[in-house]
Image (tube, grey):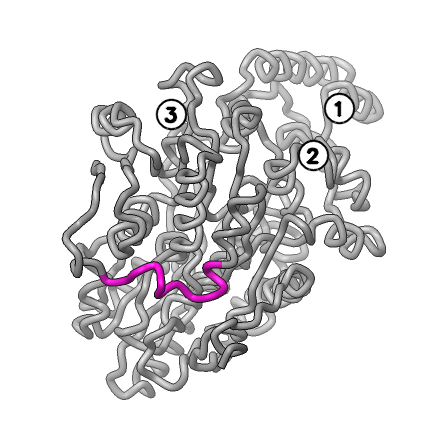
Amino acid sequence: MQSLSGRRPRGSFKFRETDLRFYQRHFAEVITKQSCLLAIPMSLGKTVSTLTGARMCLRRGLVRRVLVVAPLRVARETWPTEIGLWEHLSDLTWALCSGSPAERRAALALDAEITIINRENLQWLYEEIDGYAGWKWDMVIYDESTRLRGFTVYSKGGSDSGRKWDFTHNDDDFVYLVERFKNKAIGIRDFRKEVQKLRHIPAEERLAVEKRAREINKARLEKKGSLTEFGVLYKAREKMSRVILLSGEPAPSGLLDLGGQTFMIDLGKRLGPTKTHFVNEYFDVSQYDYSVKPKEGAQDRIMSKLTDVMFGLRLEDYIELPPLVFGDRYIDLPKKLLSQYREFERTMYFDEEGIEAVSRGVLKNKLRQIANGSIYKTPEGVENAKRETISLHDEKIAALESIIEESNGQNILIAYCFDFDLARLKKRFPKITVFKETKDFVKKWNEGKIKLACAHPAEMAHGLNLQYGGHIQVWYGLTWSLELYRQFNARLRRPGQPSNVVYIYHILTRGTADEDVLQALHEKGATQDSINEAIRIRLLNPDRVAA
């Protein structure tokens, strides 16, 4: 926990206000005028732009206190570091509300102009200050705002997993109904109606099932769940005169991501006050799997309402970066395993290991596991059973070895997906450096002291500058998340990258879920790019115009 106040000796800062780029000055002024979402890509300096705008609001008397909410590492490192680098920010008082409860309370006691908190502690903060009554921040900056996309005020009130259903009839229709009820896709009333239609099942068993469903539904209603991050800001929103949302990718999963974020800006004036209203107005919902697809013309209608509160830049318009060169390395499953894969895909039962996928979502995940080389198995009917990892093939390891050999000693950064991926990487490459297990990883990597490194994309996605340590990246296992995918890809392709090209390899298992994931990323990327283009602003550099 730190608090800074006053000015440092002249000459001890790395940058002065005159060093701000013209578009950074522009966005700082935008912040003084309204709530907004700034879709600024990595490397364009959105942190100092936002801090400059917040300082202008404070000095002009537009706001009194600012709360910055950010991912843990970004909250602890990026925001405090930026304040320390710029001379014009040195008169700000700030506090980092992170660490132990005692450290957090000490930070709050400072009553600083800017309080920085990691998002995991936002719910704690709301309870600590007595909720709405104690909220004092009239400006909130939310870094990586896609976390607010869901409109969810309260978390789910507990899981239904492990609850006995008192049902012994092995019926596919019933299993499907139970899954839908457990996942809250249907309510208690519709569930009971559908169960009564299953006349081939004895009446006493149908009654037992309905009774258990009513008990579970009652427990759900009694246990509302805790406030989410969205819920905290929703409860305190009336006390905020400004909300500034930051995101390099505001809609990584499509247009549906924009609803909750826009609500936090305007309280529902543009896209509707609830998720139901937003979905009904702009999306079609499948009656079969409850998936949503934008209605015809929905994107144009949505974006036309957001151009005055969402502003974006395209990286290539302002900074020269080395090109990304993608390479797909395909491997094939052994013939017998491929046949088992196809049967599993069709029947949802992996006969070789006695593994059953209870839903299509579980099946997709299991298929990805097979593509990567192993599959998880959890014993049925055993309380607190430890899952078992069953090894199936080493084809991806062989492909990775080939890439390493071709790199001629260049440093390589690997993205893995499953825990068994990490275990296999560590076994095959004993000297590999694991990001989450290594102190001062960024420093060591950028100094060229790490030859082979690996990380899960969720651990390394935001705010890390790794451009000085290498220019080769390998996706050993892909992620469904476009945001994590693009953020991870941007760790090496950043200003200062000494190589004239950055290579990104995908290791893909032919004819499997790997190809589905990559296709989904391409489709999500196309949607995101079109959204970015709709809110893109083109700013002329006044210095060049004057020249």
Q: Which residue is mark 3?
A: 125
Q: Is residue 18 magenta?
A: yes
User: Which residue lies at the image location 62% right of the left edge and 34% below the top edge?
Assistant: 151
Q: Is residue 247 left or right of residue 458?
A: right
Amino acid type, label 1: Phe
Q: Nearer the viewer, mark 1 or mark 3?
A: 3
Q: Residues within 10 Å of mark 2 (few under 14, many from 20)?
A: some
Q: Is residue 519 among what the camera can see?
A: no
Alpha carbon of mark 1 to alpha carbon of mark 3: how far?
39 Å
Q: Residues within 10 Å of mark 3 (few under 14, many from 20)?
A: many
Q: Which residue is mark 1?
A: 191
Q: Is residue 62 magenta?
A: no
Residue 312 in the image, given as x and y percentages of width and height: 58, 60
- The first of marks 2 and 1 along the sequence is 1
User: Relative to 327, is 44 above or below?
Assistant: above
Residue 44 in the image, given as x and y percentages of width and height: 44, 64
- The first of marks 1 and 3 along the sequence is 3
Q: Which residue is mark 2?
A: 268
Amino acid type, label 3: Leu
User: Which residue lies at the image location 67% right of the left edge and 42% below the top edge?
Assistant: 259
